Image: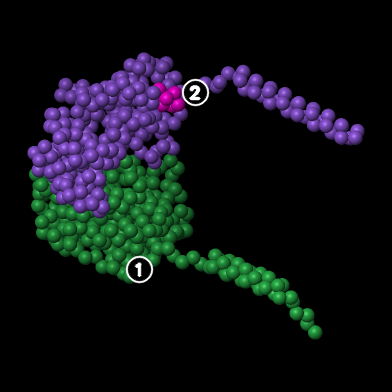
Chain colours: A green, B purple
């Protein structure tokens, strides 16, 4: 006959069991897969009166996902459907054929969820694809195929999410060509390879050539070559059939956007001269996307304007882009940086690193929401 | 009993030895001459009799070339005064603003003195001096207005800003917690002129603009603590211990003696 435990012992045993169960539950909860803190949410659509508006988001070095999401939410809310984002080859292919898409996937998922069209800038040479003691802008002919392979992998991976790809950045500047003399023939050769591989991965994608930097440097200048001359030399080298859209950079510096263009002047409307070169080469059916541009309102930089001028000029430029039928989008530099740079570049942004909206953000937002008084001069 | 006595003796000997060692160590520490901190930058400055100052001479009134082509400005005077106090000449190395830190890193210059804002991100790379100027945003009212002493008093007032400026950013932030009428102007000067002509009650604007405007004796005053801080500092290499100490001593002394105020009056 089983002996019954005394009442007090039964109570203690029950308490022990209860504690053990609680511990098991806590351990089970702790070992469970954590729920994501950031939720993608319902897909959004950008509301804007000007579908050509864009901003350069520069999320490459933004680590925290909520900041990536917040940035792209603010881009949608300002009314800009286009974003250019930098996807460094060296970050994503640390060794030949080994890809890490984690960060790029995160950025693209949030951008697409916000209803934004992503233009992917692809460059930054990994160490394995360049000689020792060269910069990440240095790509020799021997490694052109490696770059084209990366373009193939990127286009393939993001098929259905990203359709626009910029092949290199400012190849008409020596700095961007690895501190070597610029080489329109060499760049065109790279473009041809990258174009073919991109189309192989996704025949419906758009390959953007350039993006050419605005400069008036003449032949033989050690720092670069005029964008107009460089483009002509690209055509001479047979580039016409190897890009769908031309990417250019168009900064206004101290000039208003409607300042007439000239060969020897760098201003926003210089884009019209680039367009002339395209027409001259029977390539006028193609569009241009301005993948960088805008004004700066740093108080000390000699190429800056006053803050109110920056607001007016930027909105005027968006209006001009809307009127230019050959311009598909105007993407201004830049939306926000992960940390303040503490120099004149901070005065290009629309939002501070701490997500404080600058007045220019709010004014552009008003314009994109249809405000008609954005050209009204302030008090005084 | 015998064992206990032996233990007591051993303990006493150990305590005595420990005490002797402690005293010996203390004497050794006291008698060892203090190691002098080595600062190659300071040694070189003293040896050559020249202090090389990195500067971007494009920011009046802090540093710029006058119509005769002379390098002048608040920072230029400050550098000369530092040189005088250190007993050395000053050699200005003119470099674009973006290149200043690199010039310091490769020891092309001994220090950067160029309306340089404090950058907390770089404090593992360079050392910063005490601030010698605060270029942040401030609240400005008419001299005869005793009703506004800080931003908390702006409720129901008319507040002017330079449209799109950091003062505008701050004013819009304040509007989230109080109500006032915000008046944007194209330039800081126009906002301050509107204050003088009673169109508005206060202006949030940067210090440099206020100093430049009030030089003409316009009957305005800065009130309350700065709305934002933007301290200008001098940068040196991390290892320039002596130079840093001398700079900090000099800045504190120049602040206490009113020399920095004299420079402000001279250049604004």
Task: Pick the quarter of the image with the C terminus of chain A.
Answer: top left
At 46% from the left and 53% from the top, the residue drawn is A94
Q: What element carries label 1?
A: loop
Q: Position of residue A147 (x, y in %)?
A: 38, 55
In the displayed structure, would residue B162 be above or below residue B99? below
Near-viewer residue (A54 or A23): A23
Q: Mark 1 points at which residue?
A: A41
Quote the CA–CA distance across marks 2 and 1.
Answer: 59 Å
Q: Name the residue under label 2.
A: B38
In the displayed structure, would residue A289 be above or below residue B198? below
Callout count: 2
Specify the farthest residue to the front: A7
Q: Where is residue A349 in the image (x, y as percent from the top left)?
A: 26, 49
What's the magenta bit mostly, secondary-structure-wise? Answer: helix
Judge whether residue A73 can be spotted in this image.
yes
Using residue B89 as the reference point, say whether residue B172 is left or right of it: left
């Amino acid at each position: 006959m089983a002996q019954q435990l005394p009442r007090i012992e039964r109570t203690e045993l029950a308490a022990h069991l209860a504690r053990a169960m609680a511990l098991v539950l806590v351990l089970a909860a702790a070992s469970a897969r954590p729920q994501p803190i950031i939720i993608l949410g319902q897909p959004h659509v950008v509301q804007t009166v000007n579908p050509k508006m864009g901003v350069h988001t520069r999320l490459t070095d933004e680590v925290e996902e909520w900041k990536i999401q917040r940035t792209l939410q603010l881009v949608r809310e300002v009314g800009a459907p286009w974003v250019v984002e930098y996807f460094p080859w060296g970050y994503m292919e640390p060794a030949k054929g080994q890809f890490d898409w984690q960060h790029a996937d995160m950025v693209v998922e949030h951008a697409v969820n916000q209803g934004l069209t992503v233009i992917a800038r692809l460059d930054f040479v990994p160490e394995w694809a360049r000689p020792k003691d060269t910069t990440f802008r240095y790509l020799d002919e021997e490694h052109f195929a490696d770059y084209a392979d990366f373009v193939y992998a990127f286009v393939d991976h993001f098929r259905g999410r990203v359709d626009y790809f910029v092949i290199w950045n400012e190849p008409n500047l020596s700095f961007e060509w690895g501190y070597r003399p610029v080489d329109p023939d060499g760049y065109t050769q790279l473009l041809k390879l990258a174009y073919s591989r991109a189309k192989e991965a996704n025949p419906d994608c758009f390959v953007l050539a350039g993006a050419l930097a605005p400069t008036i440097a003449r032949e033989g200048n050690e720092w670069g070559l005029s964008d107009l001359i460089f483009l002509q030399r690209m055509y001479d080298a047979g580039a016409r059939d190897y890009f769908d859209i031309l990417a250019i950079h168009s900064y206004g510096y101290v000039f208003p956007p409607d300042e007439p263009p000239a060969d020897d002047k760098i201003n926003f409307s210089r884009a019209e001269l680039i367009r002339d070169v395209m027409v001259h080469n029977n390539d006028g059916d193609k569009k241009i996307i301005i993948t960088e541009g805008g004004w700066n309102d740093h108080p000390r930089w000699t190429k800056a304007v006053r803050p109110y001028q920056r607001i007016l000029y930027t909105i005027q430029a968006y209006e001009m882009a809307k009127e230019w039928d050959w311009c598909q989008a105007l993407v201004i530099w830049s939306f926000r940086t992960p940390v303040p740079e503490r120099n004149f570049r901070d005065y290009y942004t629309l939002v501070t690193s701490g997500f404080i909206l600058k007045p220019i953000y709010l004014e552009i937002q008003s314009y994109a929401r249809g405000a008609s008084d954005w050209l009204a001069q302030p008090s005084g | 009993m015998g064992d206990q006595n032996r233990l007591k003796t051993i303990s006493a000997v150990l305590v005595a030895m420990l005490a002797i060692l402690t005293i010996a160590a203390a004497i050794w520490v006291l008698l060892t001459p203090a190691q002098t901190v080595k600062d190659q930058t300071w040694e070189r400055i003293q040896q050559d009799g020249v202090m090389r100052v990195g500067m971007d001479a494009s920011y009046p009134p802090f540093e710029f070339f006058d119509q005769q082509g002379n390098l002048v400005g608040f920072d230029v005077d400050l550098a000369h005064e530092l040189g005088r106090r250190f007993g050395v000449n000053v050699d200005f190395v003119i470099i674009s603003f973006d290149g200043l830190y690199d010039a310091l890193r490769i020891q092309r210059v001994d220090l950067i003195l160029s309306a340089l804002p404090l950058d907390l991100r770089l404090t593992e790379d360079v050392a910063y001096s005490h601030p010698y100027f605060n270029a942040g945003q401030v609240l400005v009212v008419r001299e005869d207005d005793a009703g506004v002493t800080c931003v908390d008093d702006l409720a129901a007032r008319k507040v002017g800003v330079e449209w799109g400026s950091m003062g505008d950013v701050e004013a819009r932030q304040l509007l989230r917690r109080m109500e006032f009428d915000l008046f944007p102007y194209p330039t800081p000067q126009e906002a301050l002129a509107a204050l003088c002509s009673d169109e508005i009650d206060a202006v949030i604007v940067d210090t440099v603009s206020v100093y430049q405007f009030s030089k003409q004796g316009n009957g305005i005053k800065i009130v309350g603590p700065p709305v934002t801080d933007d301290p200008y500092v001098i940068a040196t290499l991390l290892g320039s211990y002596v130079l840093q100490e001398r700079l900090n001593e000099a800045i504190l002394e120049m602040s206490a003696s009113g020399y920095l105020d004299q420079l402000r009056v001279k250049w604004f």
